[in-house]
Image (cartoon, helix red, strand yellow):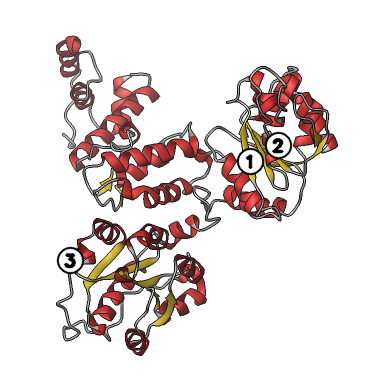
Amino acid sequence: MRDTSHLTAAGPLGASAPPLSLAHSKRGSEHERQADERLLVYFSRAPEDALVDHLKLCGWTVSLARTPSDCARLIRPDVPYAGIVDLSRFTARELAALETSLRQPLVGWVALASPDRLDEPDVRRLIRSYCFDYLRLPAAAQTVDYLAGHAFGMVTLTDLDLVAGMASVGDDEMVGTCDAMQQLFRTIRKVANTDAAVFISGESGTGKELTAVAIHERSPRRNQPFVAINCGAIPHHLLQSELFGYERGAFTGANQRKIGRVESANGGTLFLDEIGDLPLESQASLLRFLQEGRIERLGGRESIAVDVRVISATHVDLESAMRDGRFRADLFHRLCVLRIDEPPLRARGKDIEILAHHILHKFKTDSARRIRGFAPSAIEAIHKYNWPGNVRELINRVRRAIVMAEGKLIGADDLDLAQFTEQQTMTLAQAREAAEKRAIESALLRHRHRLNEAATDLGISRVTLYRLMGSHGLRDPAASEEKAGEADDSGEGKTATE
């Protein structure tokens, strides 16, 4: 990054020069129209009218944002923008709140800052991590336009398929464009508008809690509590009191009343994770609550009405658990009114790469080095690996690679997946040698190691075949002299191929 405050518009690429652009045929005429309009977001507590007027004269469609919420409202996640952020207008306390806005993948930010603010570590970090370039104030309007044009041009080179995948739902790691994920997103939107119980099945690490949160945030209960309980993480003897609470004096050490998790979710959503690990005695209490909509605290006599929407999830095969008597069938049918199957990461195709880029974009500030993306070896390994830990494992590997990578691109070694990529290159001579060896092996197998027939099939003499077998390690070296003598005595001449 460089300080370009000395630039003027008098150069060969003046303010009127059009920015780099791509024809986004996949995105349709609307996106082409918006790219032609050259969208620009001016993010400042006090925008300068003269700069706004100049940018409009230069052909920019300018939107003004004074707060991070304005940015979130104005910026579409699938459309490229240039961005101008006036860091000198924000206080030191407000800088942390700017990061969410500056992380937008399709906004090329140009920072404006006064010389004294550039000495602040937080300002320098934001510029280094998120901005295409920066200018010291005061800055000429022509120079601002010049840099904004180049930032916009660089943003248009972004892979919009990756960004579209990131924006599918927009909640943390719930990204994807494959059919399975698109079906999941449609299902979430459908079930969110009902109050029926939802059961989410899937392997560990696939993001079942993210799905539950997405349902809650799109439901009429979104302004009420979302309470998550990991049924497998709470000791069995404490589960009843954690779920339903207790009254003072209910047992030794109960010095005051405690509200349980179920009651604390009143009006909102109760997420029961790893429901398959719930012990049988707790299953009976939960079934009673689901049937009656009322609970009793331990040690209490009062029946309390609780209105919650229940979402449950587990990686356990509950059908097998019911057959084995480890899970009540009547409880399962209460919980599984609507069912969602979470796809494993290995079944999501190109989404694995999209998700890896999303995680890199989210956590790239974990490293002082500016990581730009993934090397081809990393992409190859990402697609070849089976991902038994699913999304959780991908997050962990990418975050570790961000910290450990020594270059600007993350490689397969950084992900600790070097064994899942072809590291060695092959020369043309090596390729020919490998092809020759495969052809000889195939001919020998077809003719059951009868050399005369195999040689005829390959179009060479028996002597040549025997010599090539030796060079490729396909015969016993100890018998070479004897076999070669037999070949010479047979009177076979050399072919033109020798």
Could you say which disc has been placed on residue 262 in the image? 2
Q: Answer whether labels 2 and 1 touch (C-beta < 8 Å).
A: yes
- Tell me the residue that label 1 is attached to: 227
Give the Cα separation between the discs numbered 2 and 1. Answer: 8 Å
Direction from residue 308 to residue 345 in the image, left or right: left
| Neighbours of disc 1 within 10 Å: few (<14), some (14-19), many (20+) | some
The answer to whether mark 2 and mark 3 are in CB contact below 8 A is no
**261 or 148, nearer to the observer:** 261
What is the crowding at mark 3: few (fewer than 14 residues within 10 Å), some, or many (at least 20)?
A: few
The quarter of the rendered structure image containing the N terminus is bottom left
Marked residue nearer the N-terminal end (2 or 3) = 3
For mark 2, give the secondary structure: helix
Snapshot quadrant of residue 135: bottom left
- For badge 1, the amino acid type reads Val
Pointer 3: what residue?
A: 2
Q: Please indicate, yes or no, whether residue 183 appears anywhere in the rendered image.
A: no
Question: Which amino acid type is shown beneath numbered disc 2?
Answer: Val
> In the rendered image of this protein, does residue 388 appear above or below residue 120?
above
Distance (Cα) linking label 1 and label 3: 48 Å
**Quadrant where the C terminus is found in the figure:** top left
Pointers 1 and 3 in contact (C-beta within 8 Å): no
Secondary structure beneath label 3: loop
Q: Residue furthest right?
A: 292
> Where is 215 relative to 17, above or below?
above
